[in-house]
Every structure is written in structure tokens, then in C-alpha cells.
Image: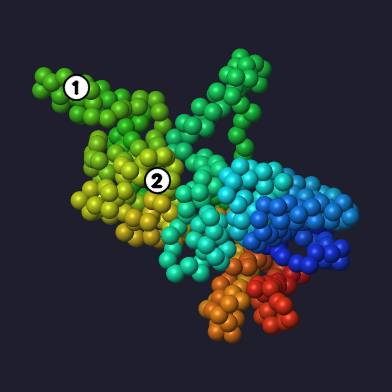
Amino acid sequence: MTNDSILTIDGLQYSNWSREIFEQMRAGGVNAVHATLVYHENTRETLSRFGDWNRRFEQHADLIMPVFEPADIERAQASNRVGVFFGAQNCSPIEDDIDMVAVMRRLGLLIMQLTYNNQSLVATGCYESEDNGITRFGRQAVADAHGGMMSGSGFYASWGVNMLNLLAGSYNQKGGMAHGGGKYNGMGNGPRYDLESFPGQVGPKGVFLSRSRFPYEKTSEYQRKVAAGQNPYPAAAPWRTLAPPALTEHMLSGLYGYPYKIKAIISCMANPLYGQAGLADMAVEKLKDPAALGLFISVDGFINETNRYADYLVPDSVMYEVWGLTDAFRHFHDGDKMYSWWDYRGGDFHQGRGMRIDLLLCSASVMKRANWCVVDRNARKGKLPSDHAPVIVDID
């Protein structure tokens, strides 16, 4: 297998790193690896781990290079090296300093679990008898790390772009205000429910629930008030003649019955409560009230802040599946208790208690060349083993 045949990323790895291992990874066609940098180390100890890796990057510059952004993986592939990006299995590297989130990101820590096994300053670990969720400090860390850019209307993003252009003096300049959006298809062409075109489909008609692209003066409400000699203004809620429909407004309008009530909501891969600040305060009680909404069906790959209130949750393909990626292990095995991770404590390996959290996600072209896939349980039985067992796929 050559490095330029397919792009191969090792999703998580922890090892006694050496030049021999780097050579094996390159020979095996690995273009990038997510390396565990720390488990429970504090800020100072994390900096020391970065120092260790800086020496490795200098000593083995012909084999490995650091990854700070996705394009670095392509650079690593082009230079026949393995790109290395770092993750932490706990938020201990930031300790109790929220500013450390950005500092660690700039150093190259791209992935950080909220917790591992035990309670941290950020969230509850899986060993706690009660799950108290994310702490106050944890919410600050999540907001800083995530960025929160999922506005239902895109208002904040648009406002930010325009303000930056104004401050930079780029209005009326050649090239316009923005470089332009990309052509990346985040949904992919893989299997998923198609709610846009199917046999027996009934097309939409009437006024948008969100009161968009329709003037209030053409509504039956306006005409009734005028015919009755009433002042038609103001309307019960804003009407937007030019603005496109917004999912957040669709849901709220239907729940509150203006311009008309709805009997059911069928959502697909949607999470409006997450997308707009303050929306939950207005919508949650209505979503839970059968008198306000008779039926709520959600088609989604995950349970989220909105569909947790659905009457029915229909599982759909997740992101990697709609990209056309296949879980190689499940392609060959469909039984239960086929784990790849067992906790050290409590004898979980011998008790048959574990999780399957080590995945090999392969494209369709790679799966055609796959012969078998196994979890090497014997590796878990050795002296001082990892809590993970290797997952191996054989590819022609």
C-alpha cells in the first residue's frame, strides 16, 4: 500500500513512541495519528509532554510532523511523513484556568475529553454513582473550546463578518466583503432518510409557519380585520417579507399557534434549541405539553437538546456513514460483547464488561479490499497491557 493511494488516519493511539514505531506507521500507509498526549497530567506536566514531542519532531523530522490544522495532514501525506495531532483524555491540562483552553489549542492539543473515569473540575466521570453533568466551570470551558457557532439564523456570524469588514475598511474594495463559501458537502452521499423526495409526498402550501417571504397585508387575518372595520396593526408577531424561513421560528410559531397551530413536528437532523440562545426558555414546556403539540417525531443519529422531548426517535445515519464510511469491525461481526476496551478496576476484562470504542472507519473502495477484521484480545492479556486492545483489519 502506498501513501498516496488513500488517506489513512489512526483515530487514537498511545504507545512507547520510538523511531521503529514511526517507521512501521509510515510503512503501513498511516498518514496521520491522534496521539494521546496526557491522561491526568496538570498544566506543567502537559508542557513537559509537549517538550518530549518537540524533541521527537526534531529527531525524526523525516518521518513525522506536527498537525495544527486539517491541511497539515495532506502536507504530511505529500511529504511521505506521518502527521501527529494530540489529544487529552481528561481536562486536567487546563486545571482551573479557562485561558489555558486557547493556550493548549495553540500548542497543538486539538482534542480534549471532558472527563475520563473520575470526577474533574469540568464534568462527572463514569465512575461516579450520580451523574451531575457538566460543572459551571465546565460550561465555560465548553463555550470557549467549541465556539458556539450554530445560530439558527446566522445573524451573529453575519454581524461579525460585517463588523470586521467595517473595521478593516474593506467595504467598496475590489473583491467584495467575503471570499465566498466552500463547496464541501457536509452530508455526503451515503445512506440516509430522504425527506425531500419520496413517493406519495405532499408538497407544502399556504403561508410559512415562520411568516417568512409573505407580506402580512396578504394574509387572511389582515383581510378579516379590515373587513370587520378593525385596525389590522400590529400583527400578533412580526412578518418578514424578504427573510428566508428559519427553523427556530417554524418551531416556535407552531408551538404558540401563530399564524396557525400544528398537530405534529417531524424533524430531521435538527437541533434548534441548541442553535439559538434563549430558545429553550420559550419552547421546552410547549414541547412537553400534548395540548400544544400532539406528536413529535425526530429522525436523527443522536439524542440532542431538542429531540430529547420527542415522542419517537427514528435512528438515522451518522456523519461518517453519510460520507460513505463503514465500521470495518461491524462489517464482519454482528455479535454483542465484542469489546475493545476494558477498565482495569473491577476485573472488567475477565468479567466481560467493556466497551467497543476503537473504530476503523473505511471508505467503500477500501472495504472492497478488506478480508477480515478482529480485536486482538491477547494483547490485553500481556504484561502491563493497555486498557485498549488493537483492532486489526486486513486489506489487500
Q: Name the residue under label 1.
A: 232
- Please tell me which residue is depicted at 51% across the width and 51% down the height of the picture: 138
- Nearest the eye: 108 or 287: 108
- Please tell me which residue is depicted at 71% across the width and 48% down the height of the picture: 108
Look at discs 1 and 2 and give the one toward the viewer.
2
**In the rendering, which numbered label is found on residue 171?**
none
Residue at the outermost top position: 172
Q: Name the residue under label 2.
A: 273
> Residue 336 location, x and y as percent?
52, 78
- Nearest the eye: 39 or 189: 39
Q: Is residue 259 left or right of residue 271?
A: left
* Disc 2 secondary structure class: helix
Amino acid type, mark 2: Leu
Question: In terms of image quadrants, where is residue 236?
Answer: top left
Q: Earlier in the sequence, mark 1 or mark 2?
A: 1
Q: What is the number of callouts on the image?
A: 2
Residue at the outermost left position: 228
> Residue 11 location, x and y as percent?
67, 61
Quadrant for the C terminus, please. Answer: bottom right
* Disc 1 secondary structure class: loop
- Please tell me which residue is depicted at 50% across the width and 49% down the height of the picture: 137
- Nearest the eye: 310 or 90: 90
- Please tell me which residue is depicted at 15% across the width and 26% down the height of the picture: 224
Residue 300 showing in the rendered view: no
